[in-house]
Structure formats: structure tokens, C-alpha cells
Image (cartoon, helix red, strand yellow):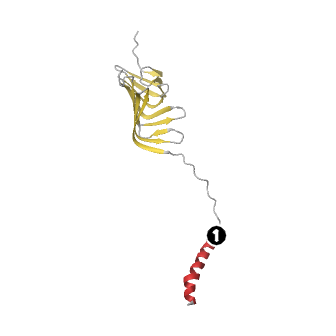
């Protein structure tokens, strides 16, 4: 009977104590500092947003995927499409980019990849590989190579500053042949 008590009570306690002694005798390893997470706080898919001023829609944005970061920055890794409206609600221009990023501290947008702006009223199109847009000034700019397709000609150059709807623009280093109207 004493053997049975030993097997049922004392042996499991002894095994547990032996395991604790082994675990406690191990030298502790230094734990590294926690890794700080810098990724997005939220992710949204199939987003359609509107920006309005004085109850009038000014900009419509469509994006397949949006990441929002702690800083307020936003990344659009699968591209972005914007429509700009005038006071009557008519679309004046569009902007499309393969990827985009919004810098909240500068209130500035950057489009990359195949960037295309179309002025619907003037039938003009701008193409470049990188373009910045300041929403507060309604201006766009780049230091990259640009192509502007007008109704009857094409203008090439490097560097551009323009209104967001291409109603006026300046190419910093134009290239090619130009027709001068006097």
C-alpha cells in the first residue's frame, strides 16, 4: 500500500520539483527590446471618397487599396484615380497614377508610375512618371520628363509647374519643335 501512495502522490510531485530545478538552473537569455511597428494602422479596399467646399464636390477619389499610418500619411499601392469638378459640378480634369502617397505634414500628394492628367475641356493630356499635387494651392509640379499632348501638337520637356487642371503650365526645360503664334 505504501508503494501505491508513493507512486500516486510522491512520484508526480518529485517529477514536478525536478523539472522546476532544471528550468531554474538554466541561465536566462537577454530579451531584446520590443520591435517598434511602423506599418499601417488601418487598411481599406475599394475606396471612393469625396472632397467638398461650400457644399460643392470638388474632388472624387477612387482607390483599390489605402493604407493609413500613425502620422496621418496614406499610401495607395495599387493606384489612384481623381476627378476634379468646377462650380457647376462638371468634371474639368482627371488624374490617374499607378501608385500614390499622401504626406500629411506637407499636405502634399505624390503620384508615381504611369501618371496621367487629362484636361477634358481643353482636350489636353499630361504624362510623366512622377507628379506632386498641392491641394491647397491647386498646383502640380515635377522635375521628371513630361509629355503634353495638345489638340494639334505634342510638347516634351523636363520639369513642370501647372494648375491642377492644366489650364496654365510652364515646362522648365522644353524640347522639340514649337509653333509660335504672333
Residue 155 in the image, given as x and y percentages of width and height = 41, 22
The residue located at (61%, 72%) in the rendering is 20
Choose between 72 and 28: the one closer to the eye.
72
Residue 117 in the image, given as x and y percentages of width and height = 40, 28
Name the image quarter holding residue 31: bottom right
Choose between 120 and 136: the one closer to the eye.
136
The residue located at (48%, 32%) in the rendering is 109
The outermost residue toward the front is 55
In the image, residue 71 above or below residue 1: above
Residue at the spot of label 1: 24
Q: Quadrant of the C terminus?
A: top left
Name the image quarter holding residue 92: top left
Q: Is residue 7 left or right of residue 111?
A: right
Residue 74 in the image, given as x and y percentages of width and height = 48, 39
Secondary-structure class at tag 1: helix
In the image, residue 75 above or below residue 20: above
The outermost residue toward the bottom is 1
The residue located at (63%, 73%) in the rendering is 21
Choose between 59 and 65: the one closer to the eye.
59
Question: Mark 1 Cα within 10 Å, few/some/many (few <14, many 20+)?
Answer: few
Residue 66 in the image, given as x and y percentages of width and height = 44, 41
Q: Quadrant of the N terminus?
A: bottom right
In the image, residue 71 above or below residue 3: above
The outermost residue toward the top is 182
Choose between 54 and 169: the one closer to the eye.
54
The residue located at (55%, 84%) in the rendering is 7
How many numbered circles does the render carry? 1
Amino acid at each position: 500500500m505504501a508503494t501505491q501512495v508513493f507512486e500516486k502522490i510522491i512520484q508526480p510531485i518529485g517529477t514536478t520539483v525536478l523539472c522546476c530545478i532544471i528550468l531554474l538552473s538554466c541561465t536566462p537569455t537577454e530579451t531584446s527590446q520590443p520591435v517598434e511597428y511602423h506599418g499601417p494602422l488601418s487598411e481599406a479596399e475599394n475606396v471612393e471618397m469625396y472632397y467638398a467646399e461650400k457644399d460643392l464636390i470638388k474632388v472624387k477619389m477612387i482607390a483599390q487599396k489605402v493604407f493609413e499610418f500613425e502620422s496621418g500619411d496614406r499610401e495607395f499601392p495599387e493606384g489612384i484615380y481623381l476627378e476634379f469638378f468646377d462650380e457647376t459640378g462638371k468634371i474639368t480634369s482627371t488624374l490617374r497614377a499607378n501608385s500614390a502617397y499622401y504626406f500629411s505634414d506637407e499636405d502634399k500628394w505624390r503620384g508615381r508610375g504611369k501618371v496621367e492628367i487629362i484636361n477634358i475641356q481643353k482636350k489636353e493630356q499630361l504624362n510623366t512618371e512622377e507628379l506632386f499635387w498641392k491641394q491647397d494651392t491647386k498646383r502640380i509640379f515635377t522635375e521628371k520628363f513630361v509629355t503634353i499632348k495638345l489638340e494639334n501638337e505634342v510638347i516634351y520637356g523636363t520639369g513642370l509647374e501647372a494648375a491642377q487642371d492644366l489650364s496654365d503650365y510652364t515646362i522648365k526645360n522644353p524640347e522639340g519643335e514649337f509653333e509660335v503664334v504672333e
